[in-house]
């Protein structure tokens, strides 16, 4: 376990796993972006199919500003 000094400098980490159905992904993505803006490290879990749909519907710049792997 990290010492208190190390822990205080680390960003909190949240994993967002939306139910992969219509009406669940976009709201969870908004929550993820809000958490990221508040200093959280966010991991967003998505299917390839839904990722491609998101890019088609919102355009290729939909995920600009978010780190990738």
Image (tube, rainbow, N blue to C red):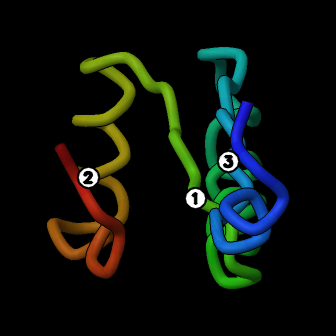
- Which quadrant would the N terminus be assigned to in this image? top right
Q: Residues within 10 Å of mark 3 (few under 14, many from 20)?
A: few
Residues under labels 1 and 3: Cα distance? 5 Å
In the structure shown, which secondary structural element does the residue marked by tag 3 occupy? Answer: strand
Residue underneath mark 1: 41
Is 58 in front, or is 8? Answer: 8
Where does residue 29 sit, x and y in percent of width and height? 62, 53
Q: CA distance from mark 1 to mark 2?
A: 22 Å
The front one of 10 and 67 is 10
Q: Earlier in the sequence, mark 3 or mark 2?
A: 3
Residue 13 is labelled as 3
Q: Residue at x 75, y 68 (%)?
A: 5
In this picture, residue 10 sits left or right of residue 48:
right
> The residue tagged with tag 2: helix, strand or loop?
helix
Tell me whether circle 1 and circle 3 mark residues in contact (CB < 8 Å).
Answer: yes
At 37% from the left and 17% from the top, the residue drawn is 47
Mark number, residue 55: 2
């Amino acid at each position: 376990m990290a010492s208190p000094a190390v822990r205080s400098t680390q960003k909190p980490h949240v994993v967002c796993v939306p139910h992969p159905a219509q009406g669940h992904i976009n709201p969870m993505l908004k929550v993820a972006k809000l958490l990221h803006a508040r200093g959280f490290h966010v991991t967003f879990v998505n299917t390839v199919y839904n990722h491609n749909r998101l890019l088609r519907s919102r355009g290729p710049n939909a995920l600009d500003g978010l780190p990738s792997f």
